[in-house]
Image (cartoon, grey):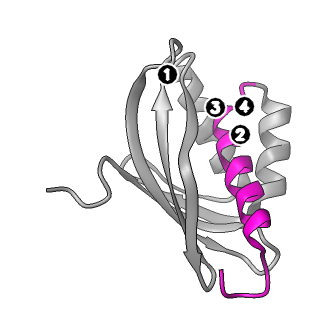
Amino acid sequence: MSNDTATHTDVDITIDGYLAAWNATEPDERAALVARHWAPDARMVDPLVDVTGHAELEAVFARFHDEYPGCTFRRTGGHDGHHDLVRWGWEMLDAEGGRVLDGIDVATIAPDGRLAHVIGFFGAAIPA
């Protein structure tokens, strides 16, 4: 990344924290991860949600576990970024480890290194 606010390793930690927040099943753990890796007024948008702020993010992550018991997310590789932008691939796995869904996320990193805005896309990076 070309800005001075975050190193490559810092961004990896933030992305891993983002995925850990999705995967956290305990409310206190989830809240701590959101506070650590998301700016207070952060926004997340994907085909299913459009939320802003820690409380709404935590609610989305909790609802994920209610609707998809045993499912988790993981990264499918590294990340690519420039300026205050970063993108990475991910996949959603069922309880047995089978892939349910994949996609990419594009995020804006706040000056403090936390996520300011995440935009998620389901499926291939560029549909045929």
Separation (CA) of disc 3 from disc 1 = 10 Å
Give the mark toward the camera: 2 or 1. 2
Mark 3 or mark 1, earlier in chain: 3
Q: What residue lies at 54% left-to-right and 31% top-to-bottom?
A: 64
Q: Which residue is mark 4?
A: 24
Q: Which residue is mark 1?
A: 68
Q: Which residue is mark 2?
A: 20
Residue 43 appears left or right of 126: right
Residue 104 spot, x, y in % from top left: 44, 54
Separation (CA) of disc 4 from disc 2 = 6 Å
Mark 4 or mark 1, earlier in chain: 4
Amino acid at the residue labelled 4: Ala
Amino acid at the residue labelled 3: Ala
Give the mark toward the camera: 3 or 1. 1
Give the mark toward the camera: 3 or 2. 2
Amino acid at the residue labelled 2: Ala
Relative vertical location of residue 30 with respect to residue 11 in this rendering, above or below? above
